[in-house]
Image (cartoon, rainbow, N blue to C red):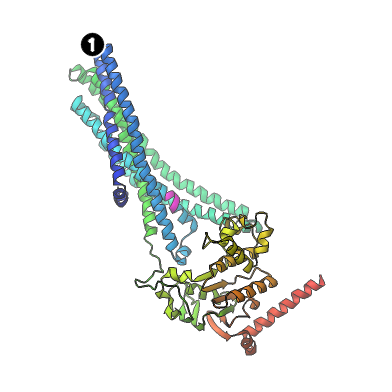
Amino acid sequence: MKVLWDLGWFFKERKKHYIIGIITLMFVAFLQLAPPKIIGMIVDAVTEDELTFHMLTRWMIILAVAGVLMYGGRYVWRTMIYGSSVYLARTLRQQLFLHFTKMSPSFYQRRRVGDLMAHATNDINAVQQTAGMGILTLADSLSTGGFVILTMAFTISWKLTLIALIPIPFMVLLTSYYGRLLRKRFRVAQEAFSDLNDKTQESISGVKVLKTFGQQEEDIAEFTDRSKEVVDKNMHVARVDALFDPTIAGIFAISYVLSFYFGTQFILAGDITIGDLIAFTAYLGLLTWPMLAIGFLFNIVERGNASYTRILSLLAVEPEIQDRSNAVKKLPHGDIVFAVDKFTFPDDTRPALRNLHFTLKQGETLGIVGKTGSGKTAILKVLMREFDGYTGSITYGGIPITHYKKECLLQAIGYVPQDHFLFSTTLAENIAFTNPQIDQEKIVAAAKSAHIHEDILSFSDGYETLVGERGVSLSGGQRQRVSIARALLMDPELLLLDDSLSAVDARTEEAILHSLKEQRKDKTTIITSHRLSAIQHAHQIIVMDEGEIVEIGDHDSLIKQQGIYKEMYDLQQLESIVEQGGEAIE
């Protein structure tokens, strides 16, 4: 029952609804006592030849009124109790989603998307069942069971009632044991479902790669194995779950046998009448549901306990990046000064950045080049405070970025990542993501600056074209330019382009860079790239190698240094000549 205690905060919040629901439930349980007693009285009247039409009519009217009242009462308590459980599911789902949005990237590195989705679906459904069906079975088993037992004892025979209840303690012990066993197995089953959920999400997202490499059969085989594992784990749960009903039914069969045997003896002794025995067995039938409800209660509560524990463990994870109590609540503006001595990604031993010292003036463009893994993206990630675990300082406008309220810092930054994520909606809504209410003219202007406008017009629905999940219907270059348009629409104080021109041709790249130069004369821009043509116009260029700056300067000064930058430039010039020669031959 620990989960009910843990959900006390919610029961207090919905106290009024649960009180109304439980009182109505008890009222219905009380009304259920009337039919067996009336039937017993009618049987005795028939036996003694005292039944009249007037008496029968009166009892039928009473039964009809009781039936109508029970109908209305059941509607009320279902609305109050089940409705509240739906509200709990919504509350937990919102808490989880809000929690996910606050988490740092390292949180998602350690946890799989499928597992997080399982928490927000299956686990929440199990907790919802606890707050709905669980509370119902608890209240109903206590109220109906209590009323029935008291009625049997005080209106028929307390001796016969005690005899009928002799097997009940054995049922309580067995169902309690089943419940503990169920909780352990259900937790394992939920974890297996999380694995399957993650596998499904991963396979669907990477279906193009699977088909390209012809790995469909291997992937299907792996999915089949994991699906079989989920079935096996749930069968372990089902085997325990299946023990509840037979155990309760078997014990109640013993109660029925004892009731008929000793009830017959009491009739012969003149302690009760035949009508009393019929009423008693009818009450015993009413008692079947409360006893079954106890089994359901253990089942539901243990499932809810396992799932709520999983949810709480997730909610207990604190965001690694948090605002200071006196965080600066203004958008940053001014020069950016990097003075990072060392930065290492979580769960990694090799430093990603070392001895990183440079200053970027307000309104300038910084180009960052280097081979893969040299630290280009790491610079942008620490600047956006995706990670704080570095030695040294980074200031923006003379204030350390850790002193800004993170929301204010990010509002000043427009970011175009390497992995361009587009939402499954229209092109216009993807571009206007940061400001859905913005004018269409500004959306078009941003698209023109990113040189995606003409491509959009070529689509049958223009800006209202649905791009599909993650922009599946667009080419790589088109996705890049839509992402750039989205960032430009913000008109950010600082624009970060993380190798964001790699999928466009040289002419389009040049046009986009020209637009950036014209429109962002007083704004700061950082561009990382493998192609020097994307950054050679920058006011300052740094060359990265194994997390360190090995060369720094503008394009002309770096060429004169005859170092790594000059080698990269000569190599890319040669590649360009070869490509042009190849085209000429064709």
In the image, residue 300 lies at what x, y percent? 36, 43
Q: What range of the chain is rendered magenta?
A: 119-123
Above or below: residue 116 compared with residue 388: above
Q: Quadrant of residue 219?
A: bottom right
**Circle 1 residue:** 50
Q: Position of residue 386 (x, y in %)?
A: 46, 70
Which residue lies at the image location 35% right of the left edge and 73% below the top edge?
A: 326
User: Is residue 57 among what the camera can see?
Assistant: yes
Q: Please indicate, yes or no, whether residue 182 appears anywhere in the rendered image.
A: no
Residue in the picture at 60% in, 80% down? 538
Circle 1: is it few (<14), some (14-19), or many (20+) Cα within 10 Å?
Answer: few
Q: Is residue 189 above or below residue 174?
A: below
Position of residue 76 measured from the top left corner of the image (x, y, whole percent): 34, 36
- Viewer-proximal residue, 584 or 247? 584
* Lateral position of residue 280 relative to residue 467, left or right: left
Q: Quadrant of the C terminus?
A: bottom right
Residue 482 vertical position relative to residue 543 in the rendered view, above or below: above
Amino acid type assigned to the residue bearing label 1 in the image: Glu
Q: Is residue 451 left or right of residue 548?
A: right
| Nearer to us in this view, 280 or 582 | 582
Magenta stretch, main secondary structure class? helix
- Total numbered badges shown on the rendered structure: 1
Q: Quadrant of residue 468?
A: bottom right
Residue at left offset 29%, top offset 44% = 16
Q: Is residue 141 above or below residue 378?
A: above
Q: Find numbered disc 1 in the image and state the secondary structure of the residue it sits on.
A: loop
Q: Residue furthest right?
A: 585
Is residue 196 shown in magenta?
A: no
Q: Position of residue 144 (x, y in %)?
A: 27, 33
